[in-house]
Amino acid sequence: MRKLKLLSLSLFLPFILGCSDNETEKDYQIEVDAAVKNIHANLQKDLNTDVPSLSVYVVSPKGTYFSTIKGTNGSVVTPNTYFRFASNTKNFTSTAILKMMQDGWLKLDDKITANIPGTTVPYTPDVADWDFPNKNLITIRQILQHNAGIYDVTNDPSQYDVNGETYTDYMLENFPDHQFTASEYVKILKDHNLKYGVPNSVYHYSNTGFAILSEIIARIYSQKTSSSKTYGDYMYDQIVGPGTKKPLGIKFPELASDKQLPSPYVKGFIKYANHNEITDQKNASAHIGEGNGVGTMVMLTDYIRSLMKGQNVLYASSAELMRTSKGAATTSGYALGCSNFAGIGYGHNGATEGYLSLMTYDPTNDVSVIVLLPYWDLSSTANFAKCLNTLNVTGLEVKKVLGY
């Protein structure tokens, strides 16, 4: 996610998907449409600017509903429109780790310096450049929980910056085709003694921690297949590809050159204090394992519903572990790559240049909610917070309309 130095309505597009002719379901669609229209209008009013679009996709026992609203400068969004879902990727990475646990390929409470089960090869490279602070104390579970104390090179310039920017932002702006690696990030941790504290002494969100997990996944898969494999290989072969239990068209680009979104896609929009920017092309190699996912609202729905119900690659017990295993230092609802959004459900959210999204499932009521807002207002920190908060507001209001 880039640094955070931190509606005139022209078209309203209601969709009714999967609903019967039952009058109650038709009324629900009308009410969902009205709620989304109102939230979008309020956000435009609060920001005093046009907001390109706001969309929500809900699957519930009462029916499936999609509603989208388009601002003056927006483009049409459908349930099958691709977008960058950013940190929702962390939930997929957690799924990969938990599947490896199920398969006996790793142990959650192993130190990351331990050997991969059945091998003499450690989870992380045993080389000097990987000797970052507290490495010998950190477990796989703690990284999933953001309780490992690993400094976030991608988001946090407080301890280390390059010309006032995070390392990742600086490199993306000055060397947009640079191929990022996890080894590159951990060397910065080592060279500058960067850390938040010893494991379980402090909770701090860390993209860099999940980049390390992506390296662990690649190393384990390489050992188990006796071939050179990447994080993306494992995700395609074992989590979302055509040979998996729930095949999806989700992609996890790893090459700096793989910048083009599949079609159809929606572009992101960023409003700065003195200019605007349209985003779609992106070097996702800076965010492998923590923010490089690309998909649609339907795909995210199919994933999160099947996953949390134990109908995908995870057992129901593993999905429960994902939702509930929190670190000692955690005061938030974050567990294993999974947040509890009060009143909405379990899942994750994501923010990457010009895209905001939310992916949740409520196991009590069997309701999944996907929200997409392809817009950032960086004219002020407060305005960006309003954009981000709109995800939760939309999820809560739509569930309320449906009686949940």
Image: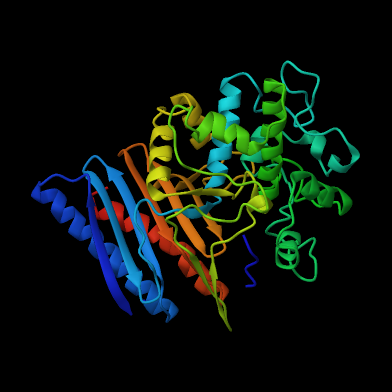
Can I make out residue 206 in this image? no
In-front residue for pair 404/369: 369
Task: Give the residue drawn at x 67%, y 22%.
Answer: 225
In-front residue for pair 247/197: 247
Q: Does 164 sit above or below residue 193?
A: below
Q: Count the labels in the image.
A: 0
In-front residue for pair 171/1: 171
Can I make out residue 5 in this image? yes
Corner quadrant of residue 380 = bottom right
Task: Give the residue drawn at x 70%, y 56%.
Answer: 154
Task: Give the residue drawn at x 71%, y 41%.
Answer: 212
Q: Is residue 195 left or right of residue 340?
A: right
Task: Give the residue drawn at x 57%, y 63%.
Answer: 353
Q: Is residue 316 left or right of residue 397?
A: right
User: Which residue is outermost to the right?
Assistant: 128
Q: Does 113 sit above or below residue 337?
A: above
Q: Quadrant of the N terminus?
A: bottom right
Q: Is residue 216 left or right of residue 298?
A: right
Locate residue 291, reporting x and y percent.
Answer: 59, 50
User: Which residue is outermost to the top?
Assistant: 118
